């Protein structure tokens, strides 16, 4: 079963060498989380705009709802708000987790919380389409599908709007990862991680026409 831990797996240097020898290619990606966070800022803005647009289809949304007025910023954070944010972080990571193949039986999959938020890590070999699905699922389900469903039932409150937007912005690193995968990993490939490093490998060789 997926294991619970309080730190992201660091990976094995020996495994890095073995993967390279076995034909795996390391994906070019930020080496530090801080760098990834900075590079993901444009996606943070884009994600927020997408969610605002989705909410605005059925419900009005304004800066005043979130405590932003011409007189200043008025934001109240109480225990309930903190608990809701923690719940959002856990839900976001659980959605990542449930799309990992055989996550219940996997001995190479982990979930946990750190000071910087939650994480899900796996060293299972995963097809590119499934890896993409795992990456974008929390953003799509929480920040696009959920506001549409809640709007139908008239249950889209200001608190839920805040949580939806928070999830959108928190999904910015996921969107950066998505872009890197789409740009670097060919179709018909599988991916796997060793700690924070991502590797890919083609599973099909393109046929070549021999000219005589």
Image (tube, rainbow, N blue to C red):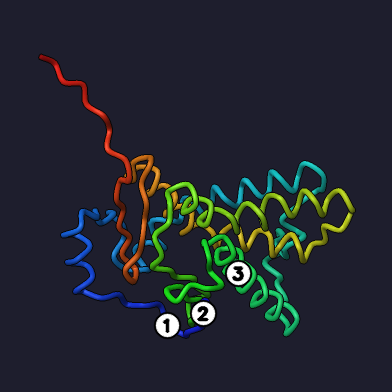
Residue 184: x %, y % from top left: 32, 45
- Pointer 3: residues within 10 angstroms few (<14), some, or many (20+)? some
User: How far is mark 3 from mark 1, CA to CA?
Assistant: 16 Å
Circle 1 sits on which residue? 7
Tell me the element at label 3.
helix
Dot 1 lies on which element? Answer: loop
> Going by the picture, which residue comes out furthest to the front?
212
Side of 14 relative to 175 (left or right): left
**Residue that badge 3 annotates:** 94
N-terminal-most mark, 2 or 3:
3
Which disc number belongs to residue 112? 2
CB contact under 8 Å: marks 3 and 1:
no
Q: Residue at x 52, y 76 (%)?
A: 2
> Mark 2 and mark 3: span between their CA atoms?
10 Å
Looking at this view, name the residue that lies furthest to the left: 212
Q: Which percent across, then down, holds residue 185?
A: 34, 45
Pointer 1 local density, CA inside 10 Å: few below 14, some 14–19, many at least 20: some
Asked if the residues shown at circle 1 and circle 2 are in contact, with their CB atoms under 8 angstroms apart, the answer is: yes
Q: Position of residue 12 (x, y in %)?
A: 25, 76
Residue 96, given in percent of the width and then of the height, sits at 55, 63
The earlier-in-sequence mark between 3 and 1 is 1
Left or right side of 12 for 119 = right
The residue located at (48%, 52%) in the rendering is: 175
Name the one closer to the observer, 84 or 45: 84
Please tell me whether residue 70 is drawn above or below residue 59 in the rendered image: below
Q: Nearer the viewer, residue 40 or 24?
A: 24
Ranked by sequence position, the earlier of labels 1 and 2 is 1
Q: Which mark is residue 203?
A: none
Q: Nearer the viewer, residue 95 or 168?
A: 95
């Amino acid at each position: 079963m997926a294991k619970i831990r309080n730190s992201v797996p660091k990976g094995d240097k020996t495994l890095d060498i073995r993967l390279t020898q076995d034909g795996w290619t390391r994906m070019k990606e930020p080496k530090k989380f801080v760098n990834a966070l900075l590079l993901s800022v444009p996606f943070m803005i884009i994600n927020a705009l997408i969610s605002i647009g989705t909410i605005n289809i059925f419900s009005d949304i304004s800066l005043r709802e979130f405590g932003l007025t011409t007189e200043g910023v008025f934001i109240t954070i109480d225990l309930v708000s903190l608990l809701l944010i923690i719940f959002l972080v856990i839900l976001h990571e659980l959605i990542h987790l449930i799309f990992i193949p055989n996550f219940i039986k996997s001995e190479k999959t982990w979930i946990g919380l750190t000071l910087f938020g939650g994480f899900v890590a796996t060293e299972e070999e995963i097809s590119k389409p499934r890896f993409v699905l795992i990456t974008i699922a929390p953003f799509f389900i929480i920040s696009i599908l959920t506001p549409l469903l809640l709007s139908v039932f008239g249950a889209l409150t200001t608190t839920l709007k805040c949580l939806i937007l928070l999830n959108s912005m928190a999904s910015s690193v996921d969107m950066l990862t998505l872009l890197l995968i789409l740009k670097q990993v060919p179709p018909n490939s599988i991916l796997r991680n060793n700690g924070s490093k991502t590797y890919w490998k083609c599973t099909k060789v393109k046929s070549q026409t021999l000219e005589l």
